[in-house]
């Protein structure tokens, strides 16, 4: 029997209706349902699930759309980690910066003394006991305001203008900022000659390049910040008061600094986003030829793109839902995490279900298209028996009504500002299989 034969069950997929009565609320029960006695139960249906590659994910919308949803997210990821399961993951920051004020004037006979890029570090994923070498390159091309940027975006780079070798990330340790106690800040020394030639020698109070924010962005197109090594991915807050580039200089009459910021409070908002790369060589995911017919015992999910867990209802088992008179009250997908993997990175705190079109993520399923809808938060069980419970009643209704059984992608709700990795028990596991649970009543 095909899914097309299921349509007659659809009209009964609705909330239960109770007749009006004089009884107290706590007396309301199944005996009040029209027709009298009902049969209430649930059906557990195994899911077919496997690991599927994702080509790329959106990391920034076009400029106008991004402004309409509140601007560019200040939290960005930087660094790299390596895992026997997931291989090497790398996160880069790309960002424009704008001057704190227009018409910069470095005065008479200016000399740049030092330049630092400051980054506010708020958290980390992975092993922070290994040193990192951080490098900053100027962008050779500017960002198009009409473009949507994806996680595999790779810009043309100009000169290296900053470097910090041997950095030991300590996101919970205070640092010094201009001789004052401050939260965890990364200080990257920048190329003095570059800023002498392109800033101090040019900005005289009337230079056209510094007369407007857009003109400045056409002149200084932004930076890419990368980690050449290390074993951690860092959370960077670009909106912090401690973030930006400071050009310390002196002239004939003064010693001071000029500042470039990631600020979102000017007439032009600097575009910023993180991009990601994955290298699966030597890892469990090196060969992604997963069994999409029978499913797998273990499946994998990455933030930052890479791979997701693909799943679909088993069409040979979903036929149990066509019983005459069945009322589907709720349907959920339950997927358990796999304990004991030794992964240093925590699983995602919340998942969602989206359409999977080839290697591209599509829209959220209907159950997740309202604010806070769909569930999906990680629930903690005994003996690390943790699981995600996701609502799929509306989606199941759509499957039954249309006769189509599309492949879905289980992905983190937060993919671009978190570096979580999750290993799950699949539909072919020996214990706690990925399952659809359908709760129903039959009058």
Image (cartoon, rainbow, N blue to C red):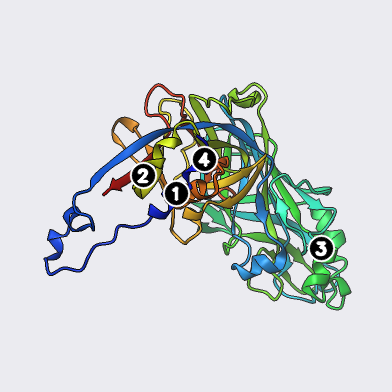
Picture quadrant where residue 303 is located: top right
Q: Name the residue under label 4.
A: 3
Mark 2 Cα-neighbour bin, 10 Å: few <14, some 14–19, many ≥20: few
Q: Residue 260 or 32: which is nearer the viewer? A: 32
Mark nearest the camera among 3 and 1 is: 1
Residue 383: assigned label? none
Mark nearest the camera among 4 and 1 is: 1
The answer to whether one can see residue 409 in this image is yes
Q: In this view, does 79 lie to the left or right of 7?
A: right
Q: Mark 3 points at which residue?
A: 111
Residues at marks 4 and 1, CA–CA distance in whole angstroms: 11 Å
Mark 1 Cα-neighbour bin, 10 Å: few <14, some 14–19, many ≥20: some
How far from the left and from the top, in percent, is residue 389?
39, 43
Residues at marks 4 and 3, CA–CA distance in whole angstroms: 75 Å
**Which of pointers 4 and 1 lies earlier in the amino acid sequence?**
4
Mark nearest the camera among 4 and 2 is: 2
Mark nearest the camera among 2 and 3 is: 2
């Amino acid at each position: 029997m095909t899914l097309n034969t299921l349509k007659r069950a659809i009209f009964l997929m609705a909330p239960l209706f109770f007749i009006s009565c004089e009884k107290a609320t706590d007396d309301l029960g199944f005996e009040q349902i029209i027709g009298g006695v009902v049969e209430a139960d649930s059906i557990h249906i195994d899911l077919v699930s496997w690991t599927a590659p994702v080509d790329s994910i959106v990391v920034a919308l076009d400029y106008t759309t991004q402004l309409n949803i509140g601007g560019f997210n200040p939290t960005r990821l930087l660094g790299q980690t390596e895992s026997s399961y997931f291989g090497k993951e790398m996160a880069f920051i790309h960002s424009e910066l704008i001057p704190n004020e227009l018409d910069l004037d470095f005065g008479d006979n200016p000399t740049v003394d030092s330049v630092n890029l400051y980054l506010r570090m708020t958290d980390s994923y992975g092993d922070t006991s290994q040193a990192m070498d951080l490098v900053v390159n100027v962008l050779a091309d500017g960002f198009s305001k009409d473009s949507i940027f994806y996680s595999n975006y790779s810009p043309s780079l100009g000169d290296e203008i900053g470097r910090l070798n041997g950095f030991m990330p300590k996101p919970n340790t205070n640092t010094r900022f201009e001789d004052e106690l401050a939260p965890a800040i990364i200080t990257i020394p920048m190329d003095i000659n570059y800023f002498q030639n392109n800033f101090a020698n040019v900005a005289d109070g009337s230079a056209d390049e510094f007369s407007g924010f857009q003109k400045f962005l056409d002149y200084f197109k932004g930076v890419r910040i990368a980690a050449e090594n290390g074993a951690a991915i860092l959370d960077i807050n670009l909106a912090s008061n401690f973030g930006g580039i400071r050009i310390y200089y002196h002239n004939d009459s003064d010693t001071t600094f000029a500042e470039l910021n990631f600020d979102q409070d000017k007439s032009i908002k600097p575009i910023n986003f993180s991009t990601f790369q994955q290298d699966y060589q030597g890892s469990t995911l090196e060969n992604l030829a997963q069994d999409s017919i029978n499913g797998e015992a273990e499946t994998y999910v990455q933030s930052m793109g890479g791979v997701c867990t693909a799943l679909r209802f088993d069409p040979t088992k979903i036929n149990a839902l066509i019983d005459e008179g069945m009322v589907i009250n709720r349907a959920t997908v339950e997927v358990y995490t796999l304990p004991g993997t030794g992964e240093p990175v925590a699983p995602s705190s919340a998942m969602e279900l989206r359409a999977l079109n080839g290697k591209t993520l599509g829209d959220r399923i209907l159950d997740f298209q309202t604010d806070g809808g769909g569930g999906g938060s990680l629930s903690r069980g005994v003996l690390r028996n943790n699981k995600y419970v996701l609502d799929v009643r509306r989606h199941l209704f759509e499957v039954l009504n249309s006769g189509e059984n599309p492949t879905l992608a289980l992905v983190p709700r937060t993919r671009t500002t978190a570096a979580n990795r999750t290993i799950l028990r699949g539909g072919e596991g020996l214990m706690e299989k990925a399952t659809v649970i359908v709760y129903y009543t039959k009058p």
